[in-house]
Image: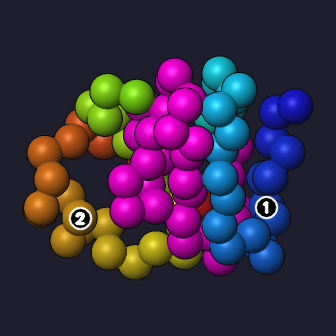
Amino acid sequence: GYYVFYACSSLESITIPEEVTSISYNEFGGCSSLKSINVHNGNKNYMSENGILFNKKRTEIIKYPEGKTDFIEYIKRKEVKAAIYSKS
């Protein structure tokens, strides 16, 4: 369902299974300890790099984990379109 992990402040990492086809906006909002979002290699819609959730083509950041602190450094190293970036 939607917002299953919303405001789960104790969540530090998660792996998105192969079967997940959509992730709601702000699904991980309020997860202040979240440092890593990983994606099963077989997922057809999403991928992760360095714990950051991207669309499969890696052209959009879907969610940058709130517990990570290196966003500016990451963007300087990579050419990506930050479509959704919220630090709630």
Q: Is residue 47 left or right of residue 57?
A: right
Q: Give the amino acid at mark 2.
A: Tyr
Q: Which residue is mark 1?
A: 7
Q: Secondary structure at mark 1?
A: loop
Local crowd at mark 1 within 10 Å, few (<14), some, or many (≥20)? some
Q: Which residue is mark 2?
A: 74
Residue 77: percent from left, percent from top: 12, 61
Alpha carbon separation for disc pair 1 and 2? 25 Å
Residue 23: percent from left, percent from top: 65, 32
Q: Secondary structure at mark 2?
A: helix
Q: Give the amino acid at mark 1.
A: Ala
Magenta span: helix, strand or loop, mainly?
loop
- Identify the residue at image location x=78%, y=53%: 6
Q: Is residue 71 left or right of residue 28?
A: left
Q: Quadrant of residue 1?
A: top right
Total number of numbered discs in the rendering: 2
- Identify the residue at image location x=65%, y=21%: 21
Residue 43: percent from left, percent from top: 56, 30
Residue 63: percent from left, percent from top: 50, 48
| Vertical position of residue 69 compared to residue 51: above or below | below
Q: Quadrant of residue 10?
A: bottom right
Instruction: Report the span colored magenta.
Output: 26-55
| Vertical position of residue 51 compared to residue 21: above or below | below
Residue 71 visible: yes
- Asked if the residue at tag 2 contacts the one at tag 1, i.e. Cβ–Cβ closer than 8 Å, the answer is no
The question of residue 40 being in magenta is answered with yes
Ranked by sequence position, the earlier of labels 1 and 2 is 1
Residue 62 visible: no
* Quadrant for the C terminus in the image: bottom right
In the image, 10 versus 25, the foreground residue is 10
